[in-house]
Amino acid sequence: MGCGGSKRKRTEVGDFMIFSEYFHALYPYLSDGEKQLDFFDAVIGHFIDEEAQEACELLKCKPDTKRRYIKETDPNKIKPEYAKYVHSKHNSDSYINWINDKMYAADAYDKIDEWLTNSGIEFNDVCVACDTLLADIFFAIAYPNAGGGSEVKIPEKTAVENTDSQQLAQSDQDLLKEFHVDFDSVLEKCIASDQAEVWFTSTLAAKIDKLYNEKWKDRIPEFSDLGLQADILSTIATLRDFCNALDPDSSSSPVTSVRRLRIKLRDNYVKIHPENYADMFPYDAFIDDWNDGNDFDMEL
């Protein structure tokens, strides 16, 4: 078993798990006999860009300070400014590859899968879940007052028999599930939480661009359903518009308000999850704001 073996979808986690708990869940299985402080440095060092390590105050903390951060009982809180730096320098590829190597060497995939599941976390990929979980933990430390919810809500999911997804070609169903793995967590945060107003940063925009340019630009034409192709393209384009609308350094004008962008993302989210929303599509899901002024130019 390796990363990608699970078929679950993650939920929000940063609000109930602290760094010490995360650390001690991984340490017994992935440390390979390393001392705790060495493993601490390895986790942080691989989580951020290599060139960011020298200036990372969390890595430069004294040993006693690090020990207090990872105490199993009543640990000290990591300083928000330290967490903000780590979160802003996050390198998903580096951490996912490192933790995958660690799990493989220790044959620990099942153990980490079990821990994530017992923690109430739904996910598609064990390694990606560990990466996303740690990013959420650092985000919660860096932005403790950013937990307010958006007025735009994702409708409650229901399992629907004989849905449009079952009418899709099997290849389209498989490809759509792969798109969910890459984009669902991003969409859910941008739609449903005001956290996105500080969470987006350049990291989110870069992640979306990388996923599109390196993968989905070539994969989208593989969908045989042209309507699904259009929905996927629209989703990625609207995510880009959302990042642009929140970016104070952007040189281009927002195409519309953040609220309408959230509504558009919510609309598209439902469209690309026919297995959950086919019986309510569209009006029961969105009541009176379906297509509420959400006409966007799509430039990819």
Image: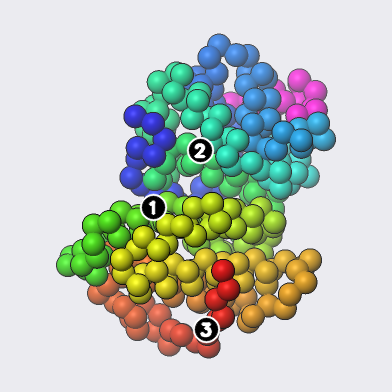
Which residue range is magenta in the image?
57-73
Which residue shows up at 54% across the image and 44% down it? 132
Q: Check disc 3 and give the amino acid type.
A: Asn
> Is residue 218 at least partly visible in the picture?
yes
Q: Which of 124 and 219 is in front in this view?
A: 219
Q: Do the residues labelled 3 and 2 touch (CB within 8 Å)?
A: no
Mark 3–mark 2 distance (CA, rounded to whole Å): 35 Å
Q: Is residue 16 above or below residue 226?
A: above
Q: Nearer the viewer, residue 161 or 284?
A: 161
Image spot of residue 253 (x, y percent): 72, 78
Which residue shows up at 54% across the image and 26% down it? 24
Image spot of residue 146 (x, y percent): 65, 59
Q: Earlier in the sequence, mark 3 or mark 2?
A: 2
Q: Earlier in the sequence, mark 3 or mark 1?
A: 1
Q: Check disc 2 and give the amino acid type.
A: Cys
Q: In this view, does 222 lie above or below 282?
A: above
- Please give the residue where the numbered disc 2 appears in the rendered image: 130
Q: Check disc 1 and give the amino acid type.
A: Glu
Which residue shows up at 56% across the image and 56% down it? 213
Residue 22 occupies quadrant: top right
Magenta stretch holds residue 62: yes
- Please give the residue where the numbered disc 1 appears in the rendered image: 178
